[in-house]
Image (cartoon, helix red, strand yellow):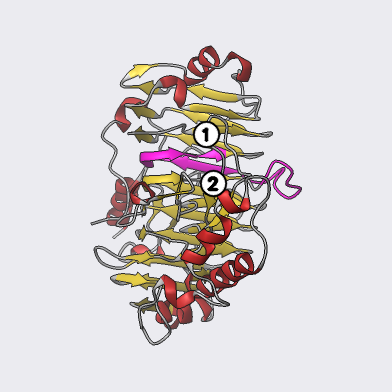
Amino acid sequence: MRLFVSALVLACAGTGVVPAHAHDPARQVLAAGDGWASAGPGTSGGAKAPAGNVHVVRTRAELVRALAAPGPRIIKVRGVIDANTADDGTPLRCQDYETDGYTQAAYFAAYDPAVWGWEREPEGPLEEARKASAKKQEATIALDVPGDTTIIGHGRGAGITGGSLRIHNARNVIVRDLTFRDTRDCFPQWDPTDNSPGSPPGNWNSLYDSVSVQRSENVWVDHSTFTDQPNPDSAQPLHFGRPYQVHDGQLDITNGADLVTVSRNVFAEHGKTMLIGSSNSSTVDPGKLRVSVHHNVFRDVLERAPRVRFGQVHVYNNLYEGAQTYSWGVGVQSQVYAQNNFVRGIAPEEVVYNWGGTRITDVGNLANGRPLSFVDAHNAAFPDKALGTDAGWTPTLNRGLEPAHRIRHLKAGAHR
């Protein structure tokens, strides 16, 4: 028996998994040294849950009940849960959340820049009705995750469509082997004053991340897939000359969250992918936001892979491919250490973007198989936004670190 267990531990080396109960992936814990979430007390989720605290869920209502049940808890998701459903299982459309006289047509008519102008954000009865309608949707699709919880896919194809897992004010949470699809905001807000450099004026802004981590510690998100399909923003129409964006982040880590490992996931066909840090003026983020992002695939995501403020963030052994505006966003007081990543099909000068930061370490990375400093490429292309090349720290919690050339054929995401 001892030889069997030892062999199993060796087989799991480099995967970020220690087989606490080899027969049940739901009881696996994060291995020592596997990124920032292994620091402090480590991350075990619901591994210690008694048999009575293990729940198999197939519907939104069952998931809500399991999340509210005593912990520690293990929640096994079987099949695909549609979060836009009533407690009795009735599917809900965007129109079902509308209240106080809101309709999309009325909103468009009221805040058309030809009528409203470009100088101020929407206000008045229809904007209040939009907010109230959004609150109704939020009450349905926002799924609050308490501490000492493991949520894991149970069987092939398990996932959550249209839902927002909120790991807020919690400690010790594991999310694994799920496919998150189309976390859609039915009620995006038009903001004519939201002007991005080099873009036309105005933007549509949405809420709801597929997974949101706030004010929480020791969180591990692993082997999951994040996609907007079958409803990508690229298929949305233009309104007021701007894309009608109905998705926010896929995985955002903000508001003083700390000690997080994001490993072996796929992030695909999305805009604002992963934000680490709340705002440039946050008073709760400094000293927090220690995050490891490793062995993930970022495919055809436009930006934020990740965008960082304040945190010590180790970005290593990830595969980047497809159309991107930028990958590593270097924000205020951020300390990004980008190591041994493989970047394919992206212009080198577009990998890094300076969002008000000063420095980033960039070592061992490959562009289409060739060694290249993406910071040097950025600095040459944008000398007025040049960055220093020393993030000021050296990661030590880097279990499974490997040369970048081994990442070119990386397979990640929820198991099929």
Q: What's the distance in space between the residues labelled 2 and 1, CA to CA?
A: 10 Å
**Looking at the image, which residue is at 58% across and 48% down?**
39
Q: Are marks 2 and 1 in contact (CB under 8 Å)?
A: yes
| Residue 297 painted magenta | yes
Q: Which amino acid type is shown beneath numbered disc 2?
A: Asn
**Element type at marker 1?**
loop
The answer to whether one can see residue 50 in this image is no
Residue located 65% across and 29% down the image? 357
In the image: residue 54, left or right of residue 409: right
Residue at point 50% right, 39% down?
306
Q: Which residues are magenta?
A: 279-307
Which residue is more in the foreground, 351 or 119? 119
Which residue lies under the disc numbered 1?
199
Q: Nearer the viewer, residue 403 or 17?
A: 403
Q: Which quarter shows the N terminus? A: bottom left
The answer to whether residue 327 is above or below residue 386 is below
Task: Write the residue at 53% across / 29% down.
Answer: 198
- Would you name the residue on which mark 2 appears? 203
Quadrant of the frame with the C terminus: bottom left
Q: Where's residue 71, x and y in %?
A: 53, 76
SS type, badge 2: strand
Residue 82, horizontal then vertical, whole percent: 36, 71
Q: Give the percent coordinates (x, y) of residue 217.
A: 61, 56
Q: Amino acid at mark 1?
A: Ser
Mark 2 neighbour density, 10 Å: few (under 14) some (14–19) many (20 or more): many
Q: Position of residue 62 (x, y in %)?
A: 41, 81
Q: Residue furthest front?
A: 115
Residue 7 numbered mark, or none: none
Residue 248 against residue 377 in the figure, above or below = below
Is residue 281 visible in the rendered image? The answer is yes
